[in-house]
């Protein structure tokens, strides 16, 4: 197990067996769980700690010390073993989490390009929203969701309701302390965006689509991120992001 000696905010555990067969069951039993496709992993909260569970490793946060991290590791292993024994009685949920795309967000905007949101056009606002660089309430058309779960109507050109879109986007800016930590590494704003997406489990291709940049540019950003953070791979970069509450 790898832990972090200074703050103990994040931990990276290696598992001695592939637990991916349990992912659909974890997706079913944890409200708000997110089951990702590439790389295959499931995100959920166990005992108040956020876990990203990959087939044979776990990234978890945030701990007050190594003892707490180790205690949690044991609880997680016990929990997974227990789940393994009970899974026949459970109904798995194979539905994968699908992030909302820029085009999906654009579809629910008024599309008047009025610029009241502070962006040059609706499409630019949709892109910023998908990157968490804006909040829905900046556009008057998104101030009134249809339900308390932020469910927005999708209207066609005739004005008919064709579907709905659930849009849950966190506040865009990290707290100043985290921005300070990021600034100390010399990461540019764009590299921070790539790092956040990478920590959320996005592939280079997905990051390229979301940020509207080429896969080659994403690859180059990832190399710079690894160099600036002094880490060896994407997983360690993701742990760094979780540890500094940037993910
Ligand atoms: S305020 Fe809404 S409608 Fe106006 S430009 Fe921005 S996103 Fe488009």
Image: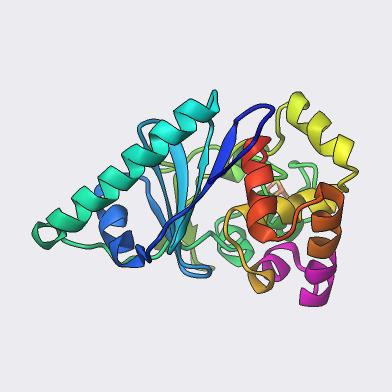
Q: Residue at x 60, y 63 (%)?
A: 202
In this view of the protein, which residue sits in the foreground, 94 or 163?
94
Residue 120 can be seen in this image: no
Tell me where residue 227 appears, x and y as whole percent: 85, 56
What is the image's colouring? rainbow
Left or right of 86, for residue 148: right
In this view of the protein, which residue sits in the foreground, 7 or 46?
7
Tell me where residue 200 appears, x and y as whole percent: 58, 54
What segment carries the magenta color? 207-220
Tell me where residue 101 appears, x and y as whole percent: 58, 63
Q: Residue furthest left?
A: 89
In this view of the protein, which residue sits in the foreground, 232 or 99?
232
Left or right of 64, for residue 94: left
Left or right of 73, for residue 99: right
Is 163 situated above or below 14?
below
In this view of the protein, which residue sits in the foreground, 197 or 228?
228
Q: Dividing the picture into quarters, in which one does residue 183 lie?
A: top right
């Amino acid at each position: 197990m790898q832990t972090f000696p200074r703050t103990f905010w994040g931990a990276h555990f290696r598992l001695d067996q592939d637990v991916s067969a349990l992912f659909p069951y974890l997706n079913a039993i944890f409200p708000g769980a997110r089951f990702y496709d590439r790389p295959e992993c499931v995100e959920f909260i166990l005992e108040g700690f956020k876990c990203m569970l990959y087939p044979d490793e776990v990234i978890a946060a945030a701990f007050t010390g190594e003892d707490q991290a180790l205690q949690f590791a044991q609880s997680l292993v016990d929990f997974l073993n227990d789940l393994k024994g009970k899974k026949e009685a459970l109904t798995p949920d194979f539905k994968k989490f699908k992030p909302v795309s820029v085009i999906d967000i654009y579809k629910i905007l008024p599309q008047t390009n009025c610029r009241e949101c502070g962006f040059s056009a609706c499409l630019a606002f949709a892109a910023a929203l998908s990157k968490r660089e804006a909040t829905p309430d900046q556009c008057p058309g998104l101030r009134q969701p249809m339900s308390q779960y932020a469910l927005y109507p999708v209207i066609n050109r005739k004005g008919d309701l064709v579907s709905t879109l659930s849009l849950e986007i966190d506040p865009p800016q990290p707290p100043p302390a985290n921005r300070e930590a990021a600034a100390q590494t010399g990461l540019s704003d764009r590299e921070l965006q790539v790092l956040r997406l990478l920590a959320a489990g996005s592939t280079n291709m997905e990051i390229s689509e979301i940020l509207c940049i080429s896969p080659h540019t994403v690859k180059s950003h990832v190399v710079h991120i690894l160099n600036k953070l002094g880490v060896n791979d994407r997983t360690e970069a993701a742990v760094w992001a979780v540890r500094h509450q940037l993910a």
